[in-house]
Amino acid sequence: MKKATFSGTRSILCKIILCLTVLMIAAGTAPAEGASPESASGIEISFTFRRGTTIASNQLAVWVEDANGAVVKTLLVTDFTARRRGYRNRTMSLPVWVAAADPESMTDEEIDTVSGATPGQGELVYVWDYTNQPGEHVPDGVYTIHVEGTFYWESDVLYTAVIDTTNPGKEIPVEMERTAPDTHENENMITEVKIRAIPH
């Protein structure tokens, strides 16, 4: 009798453990290797912005490109370069964004949608929610996040991060490239760039 009672108790305990495991997985508490589309609601781009103290500075663009290099969505481009069409007279202003987005082919309404005033100093945060400019969800695949800053005339900095939306990972590696690397005017305009998947 004792043996039968122990066997029955063990069976009940196994069922309870199994139920708890299922509940933990459903609640998202089970460990995972990295963020996936089911566990990530978007991509967060954050960095520290320090306004330059000279002319020909403080130009900023944040955007997303697909695997073919086509612009999927511009999250921000500063007003001077975009809405005021400053790229026409100052061709060194955000040259990478201008070449990719081709603002000359954009209507004033389209430009207004993506342009904004030069931000204030401090930490800036932008979020890509896996949508294109019209707000439609993009297909799963490989995309590149760009953060570009023109900090003194032709001196430009470009941060890039490649992500796979099917498994973006928690902290995404960021690469930096500079033009005119010997120029120190306003060179710390954009620093501490971090790109990560946002969990649900």
Image (spheres, grey):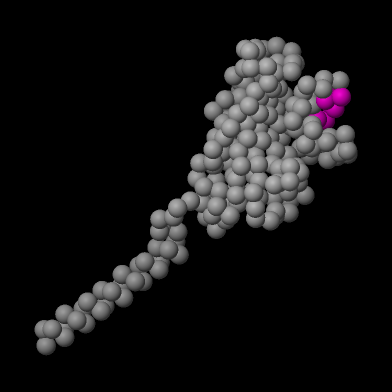
The N terminus lies in which quarter of the figure?
bottom left
| Residue 109: quadrant of the picture | top right
The residue at 35%/67% (across/down) is 20
Instruction: Please check the rendered image and state whether residue 86 is part of the magenta-colored stretch, yes or no.
Output: yes
The residue positioned 73% from the left and 46% from the top of the image is 68
Looking at the picture, tell me which residue is in the foreground, 127 or 68: 68
Rendered location of residue 39, percent (x, y): 52, 55
Q: Residue at x 61, y 42 (%)?
A: 162
Quarter of the figure with residue 90:
top right
- Look at the image and tell me whether residue 39 can be seen: yes
The stretch in magenta equals 82-88
Seen in the picture, residue 11 relative to 130 is either above or below; the reply is: below
User: Position of 171 compared to 188: left or right?
Assistant: left
Residue 3 position in % (x across, y down): 13, 84
The dominant secondary structure in magenta is loop
Q: Is residue 118 visible?
A: no
Tell me if residue 169 comes above or below residue 160 in the rendering: below
Farthest residue to the bottom: give it. 1
Front residue of 151/48: it is 151
